[in-house]
Amino acid sequence: MLKTKTKKVYKEKKEGFMQGVLALMFSQILVKILGLVYTLYLTNRPGFGDKGNGICASGYQIYALLLTISSIGVPNAISKLISEKVAIGDNKGAHRIFKIAFATFSIIGLAGSLLLYLGAHTIAYNWLQIPEAEMTLVALSPAIFFVTIASVFRGYFNGRQKISVGARSQTLEQVFKTVLTIIIVEVVAILSNVSTEWMAAGANLASTLATFLGFGYLFLYYRSERKEIAEEIKKRNKKYKKL
């Protein structure tokens, strides 16, 4: 009876893992396709073109550098630590790791965002020597914070064998990024009389809003799971007391 139950649990976990992997594969394919859509739109949009892409790319390089420093390897490291705790039934320990990581990387992400926001003028004028990139850096600065803490959530869910949650958040983020880029760039083009500098800032603002919405999905999902997480911890504590 116990052997049959163990096989059933293993099968369910295997199926759940495979579903997560397939969801991740589908997500990555969709992300690439949508990325191509908004890249083609920006490249062929009158008034944006190569100049707009150049401004966006120059600002994005600094953003990517700070993002790498603040969150490189975070999802994989947290996922490994969480999965190890979950494997031995220490759900309380797994959740403690998540809370510590969330607090730590919230501070790191916030520091990265403030650094980019406050240093936008110096970076654009002195480092990049592209004054037009200042507003794109300002527009991107909040994204560092949201991407960093979102990576903590993804690591936590991956460690709990819920890979599809992170995959869905990435897909939603890319969908929002594509749609918002087109909408915001068009609105900014009208308001600024087709200013390439402001359109580039608008495109990067769309990226920031998309990262916020992607994080929002992860946060809401976590809130919906809190009751289940609390019950898992409670059951584990009862088991220890009996022992």
Image: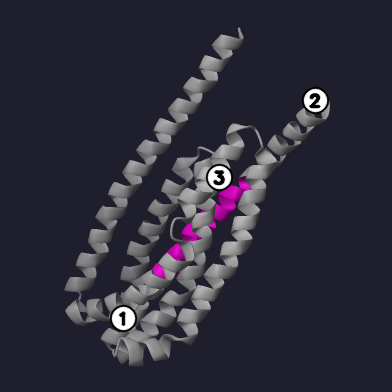
Place residue 54 in its image quadrant.
bottom left
Task: Tell me the mark number nearer the camera, choosing from 3 and 1.
Answer: 3
Assign the C terminus to one quadrant of the image.
top right
Kind of residue at badge 1: Met
Q: CA distance from mark 2 to mark 1?
A: 64 Å
Q: CA distance from mark 3 to mark 1?
A: 42 Å
- Please report whichever mark, 3 or 2, sits nearer to the chain's N-terminal start: 3
According to the picture, the residue beneath numbered tag 2 turns out to be: 243
Q: Measured along the vertical axis of the image, is residue 12 above or below residue 34?
A: above
- Dot 3: within a 10 Å radius of its alpha carbon, few (fewer than 14), some, or many (20 or more) residues? some
Kind of residue at badge 3: Leu
According to the picture, the residue beneath numbered tag 3 turns out to be: 81
Q: Position of residue 11 (x, y in %)?
A: 47, 21
Kind of residue at badge 2: Leu
Main secondary structure found in the magenta portion: helix
Secondary element at image label 2: loop
**Residue at position x 52%, y 42% in the image:** 159
Secondary element at image label 1: helix
Place residue 110 in its image quadrant.
bottom right
- Please report whichever mark, 3 or 1, sits nearer to the chain's N-terminal start: 3
Boundaries of the magenta span: 206-224
